[in-house]
Image (cartoon, coloured by chain):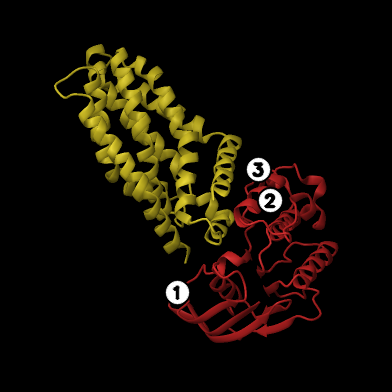
Chain colours: A yellow, B red
Amino acid sequence: MSSPLAELFLREWRVARRIGGSGAMGVVFFLTLVAIVPFAVGPDPHLLARIGPAILWIAALLATLLCLDRLFQADAEDGSLDLFHLSETPLELAVLVKCAAHWAATGLPLVLAAPFLGLMLQQETMALLGVVATLLVGTPALTLIGAIGAAATVTVRRGGLLMALLVLPLTIPVLIFGVSAAEAASGGTVPFYAPFVILCAITLAALALCPFAAAAALRYLGE
Amino acid sequence: MRLSVDDLCVSRGGRLVLDRLSFSVCAGQALVVTGPNGAGKSTLLRALAGLLPRASGGVALAGGAPEAELAQQAHYLAHSDGMKAALTVEENLDFWSRYLAQAPDRRSRSVEAALGVVGLGHVASAPFGVLSAGQKRRAALARLLVAFRPLWLLDEPLTALDRASREKFAAAMRDHCAQGGLIVAATHEPLGLDEAKELALGSAG
């Protein structure tokens, strides 16, 4: 059972690496978003230090969405999706593995880039650690929730915008608890663990539910 | 092994494309589905593969692996190849051989052997995206060989193939039938199978 899924992970990983772009593109988009914020809100270090975690989280959310629209569309176009339906491996597990590979190729680079971008936003060490920890836990949830949108728009040409409209409202809980945990890490009235544990719970719930929702959408639209 | 279809009805977009269609195919037999454009050839194959919902009627594959569903014993080959342009031909086939054939079967061929059968051995390590249309088709046909599944559902399998490749593929189909396989192929052109049955679908009403 594990071997076909490992093969699928490797295939997705190789495609992501060879086509290039998606991972690097997400990071560059992330960098650009973070870099333009001081132009909009002004270069006041105190202000940037205060809103830094929120900026990093919003930028990570948008960068994740940017990379997600081709998650299933490429497979639908080249016919791989039909063949996934014919395999003994349940579609839900295939969806989960595709999300895992996609996160490793695009989500993880964002997490790794976050501390460097945090320095641009006057973040202290504790705040940087908080942002990295919350992004590490929270971005898988963004990818998984986004997978539902990617599956629901799989037959729509240029469905990226529609996908963002569908997915953004669903990511609000992740954003709320991610940002509040990241801000709590550098001091504040709320302890770090309370929002962080809820963020972990949201990710686990997304892990359990989203593959079923995305696979159901793919089954329905495949017909 | 026997594929039997009883009173199959399939509708697409509110229109009944297949109306109470019945036929059966035995092990070692090939069925060629013919008919004008829009007659429902592709719809029939997708419905057999379970990719389209059946409005009514039954499709059963008797005598196969008892636990497996029909879809898991079938290869489906349509206009798209199911291959990633960024991966090499070998990597693509290797992936499908492991993903589609989970229990090892002695009738499954190795990737090299399958590429040899379709005459693509020399481009095994080339990215799939750089192949010509005919070579892509041959690589897609090699997918049928690397993972043995008894039922082949082929939708216009000969598109873009030259004469030599058609003969090679006809030989591969005869081999498949000799191993007890079943073939249902929708095509406008002769497949090169002498003993194939023919099912003519009516014109689109």
Mark identifier at residue B87: 3
Quarter of the image where the C terminus of chain B is located: bottom right
Residue depicted at 77% across the width and 62% down the height: B161
Q: CA distance from mark 2 to mark 1?
A: 34 Å
Front one among A71 and B28: B28
Identify the residue position indicated by label 2 in the image: B93
Q: Amino acid at mark 2?
A: Leu
Identify the residue position indicated by label 1 in the image: B13
Q: Is residue A80 above or below residue A46?
A: below
Front one among A184 and A204: A204
Q: Is residue B145 visible from the viewing direction of this image?
A: yes
Q: Are marks 2 and 3 on the same chain?
A: yes
List x then y, in percent, for residue A163. 38, 48
Judge left or right: residue B194 versus residue A172.
right
Q: Amino acid at mark 3?
A: Leu
The residue at the far left in this view is A189
Q: Residues within 10 Å of mark 3 (few under 14, many from 20)?
A: many
